[in-house]
Amino acid sequence: MRRVPLHVRPLAIILALAVGTLMPLGVAAYNWPAFSGVSQYVGDNDQETILTPANVGGLHRLFQATLPTIADGVPVMLGGVATPGGPKDLLFVTTRAGQIVAFDAHDGTEVWQQAYGPGDCRINGGAAACYTTSSPAIDPNTQYVYAYGLDGYVHKYAVGDGTERTDGGWPELVTRKGYDEKGSSALNIVTARNGSSYLYVAHAGYPGDRGDYQGHLTTINLADGSQHVFNAACSDQVDIHFFPSGQGPDCDAVQTAIWVRQGVVYDPDTDKIYTVTGNGPYDGARNWGESVIALNPDGTGANGGPLDAYTPPNFAQLTSRDADLGSTAPVILPALPNSPIAHLAVQGGKDAKLRLLNLDDLSGRGGPGHIGGEIGPLVDVPQGGQVLTAPAVWINPADQSVWVIVTNNAGIAALQVVIGDDGMPSLRPLWQNANGGTSPVVANGVVYYAGGGVIRALDAATGNELWHDGIGGIHWESPIVVNGVVYITDGSGHLTAYGV
């Protein structure tokens, strides 16, 4: 989504923002349709006006709902939904057990629930039941919500009552090997330059990197249900969901997981999607382990590979050390004045390093199959430690400078993207603290994140803490901020809402 100046936003939205917390029941100023929220920049809520650094200290619990099982992702939110009980603002949550649950966003009452659980699916054929850490996504037409099921399909539900659509190709196959291939990432939806909307479903392996899995991305055209499959291992086998060994088309390589929190990111300026792989073989031809890859919005590449790729020179060492480059996705940055590189991204990893990449030429050599290409030297994560989260982007309104907020188990840090004396971009650390957590979101000058059983709000400009509260344990769970309310799930099986 491109930034829309306030003076050209619809009048209804302006009025809703003006009344703040007095917004009528069932009317939302804006929605939160997927992990990435309301902006093209991950973690950047550029529409929030109710919560501010001045009043966020007054946050208190509005409700705490109990989930049927733990949800290890983020909720998504849609306002003004017609339900059998009247118009409601709804939150949708996917649980680890394959359930999708719709809750009233004002009081936490359950509205409907559907489930495609693990059944007899067991991880790597062992004793533990299969599970997912995915999150749902809302169709741009606002009529449907999509959720990952543990039956190997992604499902399409009517937002108001949970009725499942079973026509037009739905549910859509996304893996034939759910016992080895895990739906780790959030579902994501992009409306591309051509006007088509696509749903993205990424696959990885279960912890331990065992079993016959191949990281792959399934892209579904929401207009007609057609799909493309990009396999990060054996990419020359196009549009194939690999079969278990001996049962159909398969791949002689394993791993190359796609497990980042947001699945894919999209840059409307380049009209490409970007994702990144973890441990696995790399040969620059058909196997793309430890690589950032660029694809068309419909999920296709070129000549049996991606459109472009970045692979660090030490890719083999990263794989041997289980230090996945693919522990976090590229962070797409706004354009920087006077930068010679128009489209930049920051890429982290388990190696505790940050890299600047040129989205127009990831390797610096005009295409995939080359090693290196990062801009300038690698930067140490200021607080140290692996980056397993989705960093957030913030544009400081004081001077329009571009900041990246990085959290991990070791703490949280802010870095500014600057243009050096040599005319090239680089990252300059500004503040940090040792309170770790998962993926942050920045809204109206406030950073929200959670870790260690605590949810926090910090001043984005200084890092000073403005508010905190105790919640259940945190794994991948992270907050969203919508219309003056903060929502988060936790490891105790709760969905909690905070308001002022």
Image: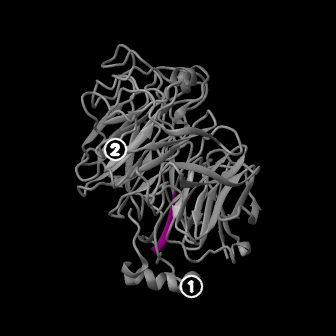
**Magenta-highlighted stretch: main secondary structure?**
strand
Q: Would residue 257 be counted in the magenta stretch? A: no
Can you say whether 272 is above or below 14 in the image? above
Task: Point out the tag, 1 or 2, that comes first from the N-terminus.
Answer: 1
Location of the C terminus by quadrant is: bottom right
Q: Position of residue 48 (x, y in %)?
A: 54, 72
Q: In the rendering, at what x and y percent does residue 86 appear?
A: 44, 75
Residue bearing mark 1 = 22
Mark 2 lies on a secondary structure that is loop
Number of numbered tags placed on the structure image? 2
Nearer the observer, 126 or 252:
252
Disc 1 vs disc 2: which is toward the camera? 1
Disc 2 crowd, CA 10 A, few/some/many (<14, 14-19, 20+): many
The type of residue carrying mark 1 is Leu
- Name the secondary structure under disc 1: helix
Residue named by callout 2: 171
At which x and y percent is residue 290?
48, 29
Position of residue 128 relative to residue 139, above or below, is above
Instruction: Tell me the magenta residue range.
Output: 86-92
Say whether residue 361 is left or right of residue 412: left
Quadrant in the rendering for residue 9? bottom left
Name the colouring of the figure.
one colour
Q: Horizontally, is 68 left or right of 99 in the view?
A: right
Q: Which residue is most to the front?
A: 421
Q: From the viewer's perspective, is residue 377 above or below residue 242?
A: below
> Which amino acid type is marked by label 2?
Pro
